[in-house]
């Protein structure tokens, strides 16, 4: 392992000061499940590692009926999975976080670290997109909000600017009651998804009033399948419409060949799983 | 530069000087001498290094020792009380839930954490809970049987 200095600021203000002082030499560590591996692989070689673990309340999960769910960036996957408010009001999030890796990793990795790493293979981002979630990005000069779908910029790249920290995730009260999450894994349950699909939707008199689709593991970033949503939104729900939506989603992704499957295979999976997830969401609505 | 950390391991307090780059798994084995925690893949895949950190099951190879400052650790050595094996350890012995033994400390720690939170797990829950522990010998069947028996044992008191 490379040599580095380790700091544990006890306030956000102190963390910003350290980040400012050390600039590109510094890396922020939360749960560490991603950063530590990248340091071991020599993909990253920070001279100073700044831990957010001692900043109070950064892992808070708070629910309000009117404003929705606020998840502190330091909340662990397991905290979110087991949160009573999440189980009751955001079943899609509960289902998603139940499937992130396995319990040991869920006990360590945080939602903020997960999103800030910008890894397109992980699960939370797609469901947060489907739930209209926003990230709160903070720096010494203030805060800004960004929809999650705009936060992912490129492979392992996010909208975070130098000096900025992802401090909170805000999920509004669910706008669409139907939901589904499919994580298709090639080998064992704790693996990354070959394809991940999150859907929320709302219907009226047999038509789709609104739908949102988030996809992971199928492009350089976690993506929203906007054109596929457009196919179903406002349309009468039928097998033909669902099939067309799946086929459209397959044109919005750009998967790569890897040990979880070929690009062609993943594209076919998108076609089928987007349709299947939507059917599941419709069944849940009854 | 070395930093001083204070950690409680299996009920005993240790003050140690460590380099920030030292992994918690290596700290336990080399600085403290508790070699029951095994180091396998060192990238968080195999689960052999699983321990309880502040009562949560984690992989100690994905932690730096400095991150454990002020925290409490239970390792495989902390499960037996006064030399008597725990119910889970007994069940592993009885069901021959190990061959080479490399994965065993991690398997036992994961089973311990599972049964602590869910005293009566289904087979599916057992398999999901052990999902992050790899075993190349047993085919997992005896391990799952051992956990089932330990669950019955703990349920019976």
Image (cartoon, coloured by chain):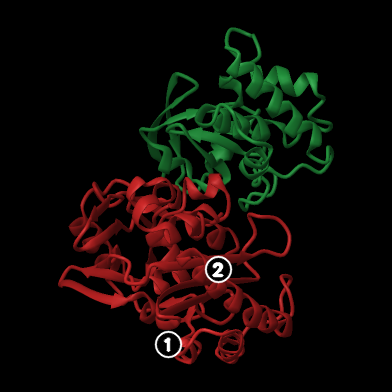
Chain colours: A red, B green
From the top left corner, tell me how far across and down residue A213 is, in percent. 47, 78
**Do the CB atoms of the residues marked 2 and 1 lie less than 8 Å apart?**
no
Give the numbered dot on residue A233: 1
Which residue is pictured at 61% across the width and 26% down the height?
B76
Is residue A249 visible to the viewer in this orientation of the structure?
yes
Which residue is pictured at 61% across the width and 13% down the height?
B156
Q: Which quarter of the figure is the C terminus of chain B placed in?
A: top right
Q: Quadrant of residue B139?
A: top right
Extreme residue toward the left, this view: A141
Q: Which chain carries label 1?
A: A
A15 lies above or below B61: below
Q: Is residue A187 left or right of residue A129?
A: right
Q: Which of A285 and A159 is in front in this view?
A: A285
Extreme residue toward the front, this view: A205
Give the numbered dot on residue A280: 2
Of labels 2 and 1, earlier in sequence is: 1
From the top left corner, tell me how far across and down residue B4 is, in percent. 38, 35
Cα separation, mark 2 vs mark 1, equals 17 Å
Q: Is residue B147 left or right of residue B60?
A: right
Q: What element carries label 2?
A: helix
Q: Which chain carries label 2?
A: A
């Amino acid at each position: 392992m490379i040599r580095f200095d380790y700091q544990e600021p006890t306030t956000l203000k102190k963390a910003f000061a350290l980040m400012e002082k050390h600039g590109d030499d510094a890396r922020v560590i939360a749960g560490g499940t991603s950063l530590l591996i990248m340091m071991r692989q020599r993909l990253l070689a920070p001279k100073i590692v700044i831990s957010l673990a001692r900043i109070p309340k950064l892992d808070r999960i708070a629910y309000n009926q009117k404003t929705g769910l606020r998840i502190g960036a330091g909340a662990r996957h397991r905290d979110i999975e087991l949160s009573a408010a999440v189980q009751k009001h955001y079943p899609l999030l509960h289902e998603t976080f139940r499937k992130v890796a396995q319990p040991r990793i869920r006990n360590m990795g945080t939602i903020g670290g997960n999103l800030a790493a910008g890894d397109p293979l992980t699960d939370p981002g797609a469901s947060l997109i489907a739930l209209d979630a926003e990230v709160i990005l903070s720096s010494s000069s203030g805060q800004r909000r960004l929809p999650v779908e705009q936060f992912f910029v490129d492979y392992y790249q996010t909208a975070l600017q130098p000096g900025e920290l992802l401090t909170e995730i805000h999920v509004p009260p669910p706008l669409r009651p139907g939901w589904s999450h499919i994580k298709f894994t090639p080998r064992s349950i704790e693996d990354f998804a070959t394809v991940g699909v999150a859907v929320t939707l709302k219907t009226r008199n047999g038509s789709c009033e609104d739908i949102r689709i988030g996809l992971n593991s199928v492009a350089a970033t976690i993506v929203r399948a906007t054109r596929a949503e457009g196919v179903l939104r406002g349309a009468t729900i039928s097998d033909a419409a669902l099939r067309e939506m799946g086929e459209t989603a397959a044109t919005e992704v750009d998967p790569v060949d890897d040990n979880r499957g070929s690009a062609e295979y993943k594209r076919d999976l998108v076609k089928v799983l987007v349709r299947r997830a939507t059917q599941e969401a419709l069944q849940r609505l009854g | 530069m070395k930093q001083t950390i204070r950690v409680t391991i299996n009920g005993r307090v240790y003050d140690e000087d460590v380099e920030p780059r030292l992994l918690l798994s290596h700290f336990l084995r080399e600085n403290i001498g508790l070699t029951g925690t095994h180091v396998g893949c060192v990238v968080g895949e195999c689960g052999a290094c699983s321990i309880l950190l502040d009562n949560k099951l984690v992989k100690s190879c994905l932690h730096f020792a400095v991150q454990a400052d002020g925290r409490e650790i239970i390792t495989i050595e902390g499960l037996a009380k006064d030399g008597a094996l725990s119910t889970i350890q007994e069940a592993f012995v009885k069901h021959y839930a190990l061959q080479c033994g490399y994965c065993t400390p991690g398997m036992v720690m994961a089973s311990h954490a599972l049964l602590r939170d869910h005293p009566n797990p289904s087979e599916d829950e057992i398999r999901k809970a052990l999902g992050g522990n790899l075993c190349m010998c047993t085919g997992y069947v005896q391990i799952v049987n051992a956990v089932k028996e330990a669950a019955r044992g703990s349920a019976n008191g």
